[in-house]
Image (spheres, helix red, strand yellow):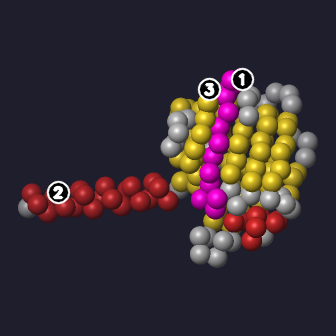
Amino acid sequence: MKFLSVTLLAVLALFTARVASAEDIGQVKVMSGAVHIQRGAERLPATVGARVQESDTVVTGSDGSVGITFTDNTLLSAGPDSVLVLERYAFNSTTHDGKFDARLNRGSLAIVSGKIAKRSPDAMVIKTPSSLLGVRGTEFLVKVEGTE
């Protein structure tokens, strides 16, 4: 009976770990200075290796910067004083179909698009307070001045 209980707990732990990682859409690869991830009501310190999820807000301080690699190999870098909301992300690793919508409320953002935008250029959109950027190429930079 004890063996069955331990086995059941191990299976549940593996299932829970898989469910949690299924929500991960990218990973912090590099960072410096003050950076945190706002996930709902939680404020999580960003560290190299930290996972990001859909609906997360990535915030950099006046001395902060962060580089994130997404599951479709999109590379994103946010500079100092940035507020970036990862609004929507879906990616099928077999077909490379997907959708990537983000909103830059403040700061600077450099992107090298990955498989989602290469498969369908209309599938990646970056919003700012005053514009909507559709990704038609593979690299771009945007800067938003002002406050959130």
N-terminal of the pair, mark 2 or mark 1, is 2
Instruction: Point out residue 110 in the picture as x, y percentages from the top left corner.
Output: 77, 45
Which one is in front, 136 or 24?
136
For badge 2, the amino acid type reads Val
The quarter of the image holding the C terminus is: top right
**Is 76 on the left or on the right of 54, as rendered?**
right
Classify mark 1: helix, strand or loop. loop
Q: How many marks?
A: 3
Outermost top residue: 62
Using the image, tell me which numbered label, if any, was put on residue 34.
3
Mark 1 — residue? Answer: 62
Which one is in front, 109 or 16?
109
For badge 3, the amino acid type reads Ala
N-terminal of the pair, mark 1 or mark 3, is 3
| Callout 1 touching callout 3 (CB < 8 Å) | yes
- Bounds of the magenta segment: 61-73
For badge 1, the amino acid type reads Ser
N-terminal of the pair, mark 3 or mark 2, is 2
**Which tag is nearer the camera, tag 2 or tag 1?**
1
Graded by Cα atoms within 10 Å as few (under 14), some (14 to 19) or many (20 or more), the crowding at tag 2 reads: few
Distance from Cα at disc 1 to Cα at disc 3: 7 Å
